[in-house]
Amino acid sequence: MRTTSERILDAREYYDFLYHRRDIRFAPHPNRNVNPEKLEAFTMVLSSKFNYDKLADKVADRLDVPPTHLRFWTASAQTNGPKTPVKRGTGQTVQTILNPQYSAYQNAQLNDALFYEILEMSLSELDTMKSIKVVWLSSKGTTQDVCLSHKPVFQS
C-alpha cells in the first residue's frame, strides 16, 4: 500500500521503478524467531535502489512490527536455508544485498530471497552487545553450549 508521499508523480519515476523492480521472497528464519510456525512467507515487489532502512520499513509494514526490530539473512543457493546476517549499512541497497560484489560468494546465495528475524530489541542495540560463548562441562562428561550477550561497560 502506497502512502501519498510515495506516489509516483511522473513517467520518469514510473519507468525508473519498473527498471529497478525486484520480486523478493521473504521467509521467517527457522531457528531464530520465537514462533516461526506463526510467521508467514511472502513475496514483495521492491526497488533494487532501496536502502536497508527502506527495505526494513516495507517489510515491517507487511509484518506489523517495528522496522528497528528486523534483521535480514541471505539465503544459501545450496540449502535454500539462511546463510549470513545482512549488516545494516548506509551504503547497502537491495541490489548490493542480493548480488554481492565479491565473486567468491556470488553464486553461493539466492539473488531473489531473504530470511527475516523479528528481534526482541532493536538491531542497533543488538549490534552494541558482545557475544560470549560458554561451554559447560558436567560431571557426566557432556558439554552444553550457551551464548550470552553482554553490553560493554566502557563506551568510547
Image: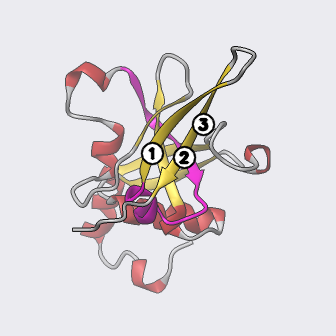
Left or right side of 109 for 63: right
Locate the N terminus by quadrant: bottom right
Whichever of labels 3 and 1 marks the residue nearer the N terminus, that label is: 1
Q: Which residue is tagged 2?
A: 148
Whichever of labels 2 and 1 marks the residue nearer the N terminus, that label is: 1
Q: Position of residue 16 (x, y in %)?
A: 27, 60
Eyeballing the image, is 149 above or below 140? below
**Badge 1: few (under 14), some or many (20 or more) residues near its Cα, within 10 Å?**
few
**Residue 147 falls in image quadrant:** top right
Residue range of the region highlighted in magenta in the rendering: 108-129
> From mark 3 to mark 2, how far is it between C-alphas?
6 Å
Indicate how the structure is coloured in the image: secondary structure
> Is label 1 in a helix, a strand or a loop?
strand
59 in the magenta segment = no
CB within 8 Å, label 3 to label 1:
no
Q: Which residue is tagged 3?
A: 146
Eyeballing the image, is 116 above or below 66? above
CB within 8 Å, label 3 to label 2:
yes
CB within 8 Å, label 2 to label 1:
yes
113 in the magenta segment = yes
Tell me the kind of residue under disc 1. Ser
> Is label 2 in a helix, a strand or a loop?
strand
**Residue 140 falls in image quadrant:** top right
Tell me the kind of residue under disc 2. Leu
Tell me the kind of residue under disc 3. Val
Locate the C terminus by quadrant: bottom left
> Is label 3 in a helix, a strand or a loop?
strand
Q: Nearer the viewer, residue 150 or 46?
A: 150
- The residue shown at (53%, 63%) is 69
- Residue furthest to the bottom: 4
Q: Which residue is tagged 1?
A: 131
